[in-house]
Image (cartoon, rainbow, N blue to C red):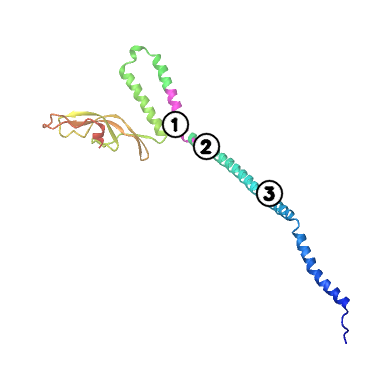
Amino acid sequence: MLEPESPEMADASVSDDAARPFDQNEEQRSSLENPADSILKLVSRLQESTERGFAEILQVFQEKLAFDEFKEQQIARLHTEVQGYKTDLIAKATRPLVDGMIRFHGDVGKILEALRKQEPSTLTPERFFKVVEGLMEDVELLLQQSGIEAYREPGNIFVPQRQKAVRTVPTQDPSLPGCIAERLRPGFEQDVVILQKERVAVFVASANLEGRPAAPKTDSALEG
């Protein structure tokens, strides 16, 4: 059979129960006693996080600068190489023409030297024209070595696609307008590309031919 508690024991139990909530409140108050410390800790963590973020951004930026610098160096190197290849190709393509011009220059020098040794009386217009024609033939040969051919359009009918009328010759013959009156200079073409049309003189109807006006003496009218 249980014995009843004594008054002293009951009082001690009550006093212990009353002390427990008091101790809990003390702990809560102690945790809230220094809010400044909590704020400092929060600010410190925020500062550390910000510094790490800025450090990462700075690292990425530096890597990007290094990559851009490397890329610019690569582009500059490729540009230099392309320019070198281009210069080399141009030099190889023009070398035959350059060599031919050098030979032509030497030939002209020899002709002049030979002419200076001749008596002035022997330098007739016919001989002069012959020398000039020979020089023109040398130029045509030089161009031919570079793939450029001189051409003279066959036939007597003016062909505006391949000929250029630089002069007109009036005529009263109704069958001659539109025909070639004189061939002045050859044309030049490379493969199927016309570099310069053949220069010719073309017959046009005169003003008194059956009362009709003369054809306009312009290249555009003749070439269409």
State which region is magenta.
92-107
Q: In the rendering, at what x and y percent does residue 128 appear?
A: 33, 19
What number is the disc on residue 83? 2
Task: Determine the residue located farthest toward the front in the rendered image.
Answer: 7
Q: Amino acid at mark 3?
A: Glu
Please identify the quarter of the rendering in which residue 184 is found: top left
- Residue at figure coordinates x 21%, y 28% from the top left: 169
Q: Are marks 1 and 3 in contact (CB under 8 Å)?
A: no
Q: Amino acid at mark 1?
A: Leu
In front of the other: label 2 or label 1? 2
- N-term mark: 3 or 2: 3
Q: Is residue 57 left or right of residue 217?
A: right
Give residue 4's mark: none
User: Hey, what amino acid is under mark 2?
Assistant: Gln
Mark 3: give few (<14), some (14-19) or many (20+) Cα within 10 Å.
few
Task: State the SS at label 1.
Answer: helix
Q: Is residue 96 left or right of residue 29?
A: left
Q: In front of the other: label 1 or label 3?
A: 3
- Measured in 3D between alpha carbons, the distance from the residue under mark 1 to the one under mark 3, in whole angstroms, is 69 Å
Residue 156 x/y as whole percent: 23, 35
Foreground residue among 124 and 97: 97
> Residue lying farthest bottom?
1
Mark 1 crowd level (few <14, some 14–19, many ≥20, 10 Å Cα):
some
Which residue lies under the disc numbered 3?
51
35 w.r.t. 81: above or below: below
Q: Is residue 95 magenta?
A: yes
| Label of residue 97 in the image | 1
Residue 168 lies in quadrant: top left
Q: Is residue 6 left or right of residue 101?
A: right
- What is the chief secondary structure element of the magenta stretch? helix
